[in-house]
C-alpha cells in the first residue's frame, strides 16, 4: 500500500469510496508477496498490482463490485490442472486477496495511518481475513497506542502483542488464532492479516569511493535508508552521493558505536565496508561483527581478506564472529565496474535476506519464490471462488 498512498490520499480526501485489494496469503510460486496491493476508485481508475498482471482484470472487476456494495470480499486466485485457461496465475501460484471498501465512515484512521507511513513512523494494520461477519474488521497498532478493534477484547490483546513484535522486525504476514484451544470471536478460529509498516531498513556504506556511490544508488532502489560514512570530508559530499539519505564525516568505528548506543542499528541493518584500509576497516569490523546486523560485507582482495582476518583475530574476535563476514563482498558475477560491483553486492544481500542460493534459476529445482516455512498447497478449484 505504501507506493499507492499518493493516489489513495486523494481519493480519500475527496470523500469517495474506493476498493483496496491486498494480498494476504500466498502459496507456491506466487509472483507477489503478502502486502502487495491494488486499488480501484469509484470512477474506475486502477493503481498498483497484486500479481504482476496475471489476475489484475479479475481483481479490478471485484474492486468495482466492492465499491458499489460496500462489502468486503476475500478471494482466492490460482490455476488448476483442469482448466489452465481459467482466470488465474499462469506461474502456478496461489494468492488470497482481501478486497475491502475504504472510506471515512469505515476507516476513520486511514489519513493518520498514511501520515505515519509517509513519515517513516511505525504503524501496523491488523485485519480479520476469516470469512464471516467480522471480515475486514481492523485494529491499528502504534508502539504506544491502538485504535479500532477486531470484535473480541482477548483477541485484540493478543494481536497487539504480536503486531508490536512484527513492527520491530518489519514483517507482514497472516496470523492464526485459536488453534491451540484459546478460541476467540464466539468460539471460532480467527485469521488476522498483520501488515507492519516499519521504517525502512538501514544500509550503512563505509568508505566514500566510486563503488560506494553505486552501492548507495542500488541500496536506495531496494528501499533502504542509506547512510554513507567516511572520515574524509573532501570525499563525503552530497555532490558525490546525491542518492544517500545521510552523509556522515566521522571515523567509521566511532560512528557505528555511537549508532549502536542510540539504538539505530538492528537485525535488519546492512553494513557495507568499502574502505579496504586496515586503519579504517579493522576497528570498524571489530564493532560490526559483534552486532546483530543481518549482513556485513567487506571489500578487498583475497589477500586483503586474509590479512584483515588475521588482524581481527589478534583483536580477540572468535571464528564464529569472523564467519559472519562476507568477504570479499558480493557474488561472483564477473563484475568490473562500480555499477556491476554494486549489483553483485545487492544480489548477495538479497540472497542472504531471502535464503537464496545465488545460483541461476535455470539450474535449480523447486519453488522460485521461497517461503520461511513449508506449507501445504490448498485445494483449488478451476475458477476463482470466494473462500468458505
Image: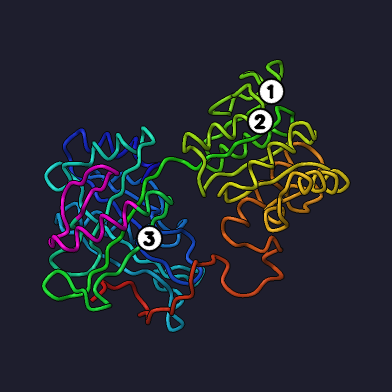
Q: Residue at x 49, y 72 (%)?
A: 92
Identify the residue under disc 1: 231
Q: Are marks 2 and 3 in contact (CB under 8 Å)?
A: no
Q: Which residues are magenta?
A: 138-164
Residue 101 lies in the magenta-colored region: no
Identify the residue under disc 2: 252
Q: Residues within 10 Å of mark 2 (few under 14, many from 20)?
A: many
- The percent position of residue 352, horizontal first and vertical second, equals 62, 56
Q: Are marks 1 and 2 in contact (CB under 8 Å)?
A: yes
Secondary structure found at label 1: loop
Q: Residues within 10 Å of mark 1 (few under 14, many from 20)?
A: some
> Is 183 located above or below residue 328 in the figure?
below
- The percent position of residue 24, horizontal first and vertical second, equals 35, 61
Residue 152 lies in the magenta-colored region: yes
Q: Nearer the viewer, residue 239 or 233?
A: 233
Give me the C-alpha separation between circle 1 and circle 2.
7 Å
Amino acid at each position: 500500500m505504501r507506493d499507492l498512498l499518493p493516489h489513495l490520499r486523494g481519493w480519500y480526501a475527496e470523500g469517495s469510496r474506493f476498493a483496496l485489494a491486498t494480498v494476504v496469503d500466498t502459496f507456491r510460486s506466487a509472483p507477489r508477496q503478502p502486502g502487495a496491493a491494488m486499488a480501484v476508485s469509484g470512477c474506475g481508475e486502477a493503481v498498483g498490482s497484486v500479481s504482476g498482471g496475471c489476475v489484475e482484470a479479475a481483481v479490478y472487476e471485484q474492486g468495482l463490485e466492492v465499491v458499489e456494495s460496500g462489502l468486503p470480499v476475500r478471494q482466492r486466485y490460482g490455476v488448476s490442472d483442469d482448466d489452465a485457461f481459467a482466470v488465474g496465475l499462469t506461474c502456478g501460484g496461489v494468492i488470497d486477496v482481501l478486497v475491502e471498501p475504504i472510506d471515512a465512515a469505515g476507516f476513520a484512521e486511514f489519513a493518520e495511518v498514511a501520515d505515519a507511513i509517509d513519515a517513516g513512523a511505525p504503524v501496523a494494520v491488523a485485519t480479520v481475513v476469516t470469512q464471516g461477519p467480522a471480515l475486514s474488521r481492523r485494529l491499528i497498532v502504534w508502539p504506544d497506542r491502538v485504535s479500532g478493534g477486531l470484535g473480541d477484547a482477548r483477541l485484540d490483546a493478543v494481536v497487539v502483542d504480536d503486531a508490536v513484535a512484527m513492527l520491530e522486525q518489519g514483517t507482514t504476514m497472516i496470523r492464526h488464532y485459536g488453534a491451540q484451544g484459546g478460541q476467540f470471536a464466539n468460539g471460532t478460529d480467527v485469521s488476522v492479516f498483520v501488515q507492519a509498516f516499519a521504517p525502512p531498513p538501514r544500509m550503512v556504506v563505509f568508505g566514500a569511493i566510486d563503488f560506494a556511490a553505486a552501492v548507495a544508488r542500488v541500496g536506495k532502489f531496494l528501499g533502504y535508508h542509506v547512510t554513507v560514512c567516511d572520515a574524509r570530508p573532501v570525499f563525503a559530499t552530497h555532490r558525490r552521493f546525491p542518492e544517500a539519505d545521510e552523509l556522515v564525516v566521522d571515523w567509521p568505528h566511532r560512528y557505528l558505536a555511537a549508532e549502536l548506543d542510540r539504538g539505530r542499528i538492528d537485525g535488519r541493518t546492512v553494513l557495507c565496508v568499502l574502505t579496504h584500509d586496515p586503519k579504517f576497516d579493522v576497528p570498524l569490523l571489530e564493532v560490526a561483527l559483534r552486532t546483530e546486523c543481518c549482513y556485513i560485507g567487506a571489500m578487498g582482495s583475497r589477500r586483503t581478506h586474509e590479512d584483515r582476518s588475521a588482524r581481527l583475530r589478534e583483536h580477540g574476535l572468535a571464528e564464529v564472529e569472523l564467519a559472519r563476514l562476507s568477504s570479499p563482498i558480493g557474488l561472483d558475477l564477473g563484475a568490473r565496474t562500480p555499477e556491476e560491483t554494486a549489483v553483485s553486492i545487492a544480489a548477495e544481500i538479497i540472497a542472504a535476506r531471502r535464503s537464496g542460493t545465488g545460483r541461476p534459476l535455470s539450474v535449480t529445482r523447486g519453488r522460485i519464490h521461497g517461503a520461511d516455512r513449508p506449507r501445504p498447497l490448498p485445494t483449488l478449484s478451476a475458477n476463482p471462488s470466494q473462500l468458505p
